[in-house]
Amino acid sequence: MRNKIVLLMSLFVAVMLLVVGCAGGDDENTIKVWTMNNSMEEFAKKYEEENDVSVEVQVIPWGEVRDKFLTAIASGEGPDVVQVGTTGVPEYASAGMFKDLSEYVGEYENFNPDNFYEGAIGTTKYEGETIGIPFHVDTRVLFYRTDLLADVGYPEGPETWDDMVDASRKLAERGDDQYAIDLPQEDPQYPFMLAWQHGWNYNVDEGASNFEDPKFLEAMSKYKTFYEEGLSQLEEGKELVQAFSEGSKPMFFSGPWDIKTISEGAPEIEGKWDVRVMPGQETNRSMIGGSHFGVFHNSEKVEQSLDFINYLADADTQLEWYKEVNELPANLEAWEDPVLADDPMFSVFGEQLQSTEVLPMITEYTEISEELLKYLEEVYRGGADLESTLEEYRAKVSDILAD
């Protein structure tokens, strides 16, 4: 009986050691990935088929990202690989979420900065560190009705901001409830884009003094003109697709997703609309957005994580992602494929991505940009004086940066 007990105990210990050994092996070869898109699970499976690594994908809704990330940073319990939107980089990087990848850039073929749009690389840098590798990119261009713009002398759309004002005044002369362009009143990036196009730049070292530049005043004055002269509707008005289709708002700025929105929502105007790069003044720079993949700061699976990110950074992977999800690739080689290079509309986005600017890489950017929208609304809706309002805004920015 005693021998049976000893034998059973020995078998039990052996089984437990085997289980622990297997669990340890699985854990050793498993990386956890946080992303914001369900399609990543399918791409992870493709990676698993060719690599001895398991990828656990957790999809986080965009609305829950900030709380999830900050909680993970505070607790130290995060994933191995994490996706981050470009505008969130300063906040999460300053909080210490990412491992600095600078020393690994030369070790992985797909990490070469020359592989990507310059603007995309700019959004991966924070205080001298490389926090991630570009995955997808985003920018804004001008959507316009070719037929209606042709009627006022601009069949290929306005090339400069002087053209834009001239075309807009002629379009607004068509009668009541006829406007030129739907300006984005709630897009915090838009005033910055307009300022860049008028030759303004944001220098981190100059703080609130950046907004003393006459070029910034010129750009905001142009913004005011569109409401002051009724070239853009002050109130919300008709839904955008309907207004674009009817022609009451024959221009608007937006991203690549609205190609599908207009094509499916307004098939009756097929062949009567197009997209073009941003109108220029001193430049025609647009914003650069998108997302990157980085390594969580305390991950113990750095090598496996970097190999997975290397797969995501590959031109073929990003091209397949575009076909699946309709998000534009950050990898330049992907844009050589006919699916993008020969598409008359998406290729315009590729052209605009060559002329972009990185939003201020400071943790206070979101608050500063949202405050600007509030102050500008006092001007175009409340009738406040522009120059004195911008003085008040500069004081507000000083307070924000001081905190």
Image: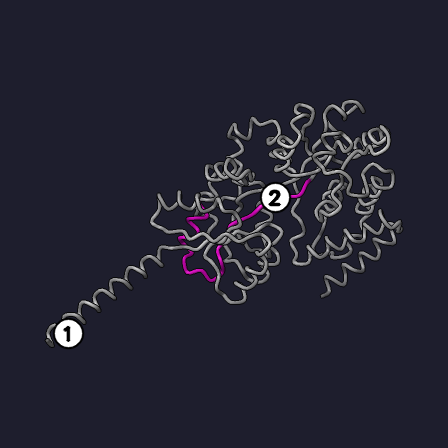
Does 176 appear above or below 202? above
The answer to whether residue 244 is above or below residue 128 is above
Q: Label 2: which residue?
A: 119
How far across and down, in percent of the image, does residue 281 sit? 77, 36
Q: Secondary structure at mark 1?
A: helix
Q: x and y percent of residue 324 in the render? A: 50, 38
Left or right for 212, reference 119: right
Give the structural element (helix, strand or loop) at label 2.
Answer: helix
Front residue of 77 and 104: 77
Q: Which of marks 2 and 1 precedes in the sequence?
A: 1
Q: Nearer the viewer, residue 332 or 184?
A: 184
How crowded pointer 1 is (Cα within 10 Å; few <14, some 14-19, many 20+) is rated as: few
Residue drawn at 68 percent across, 33 percent down: 277
Locate residue 328, reporting x and y percent.
56, 38
Q: Where does label 1 land, which residue? A: 5
Q: From where the camera sits, is residue 362 visible?
A: yes
* Quadrant (top left, top right, bottom left, bottom right) of the C terminus: bottom right
Residue 154 colored magenta?
no
- At horizontal 56% and vertical 40% (from top left) the residue drawn is 327
Distance between mark 1 and mark 2 Cα atoms: 69 Å
Quarter-of-image position of residue 8? bottom left
- The amino acid on which the numbered mark 2 sits, given as a three-letter code, is Gly
Mark 2 Cα-neighbour bin, 10 Å: few <14, some 14–19, many ≥20: many
Residue 25 lies left or right of residue 206; in this view the side is left
Describe the colour scheme in one phrase: one colour
The amino acid marked with disc number 1 is Ile
Q: Nearer the viewer, residue 367 or 237?
A: 237
Q: Which residues are magenta?
A: 286-310
Residue for point 46% across, 48% down: 309
Q: Work out which quarter of the rendered image holds the N terminus and state it.
A: bottom left
Pointers 1 and 2 in contact (C-beta within 8 Å): no
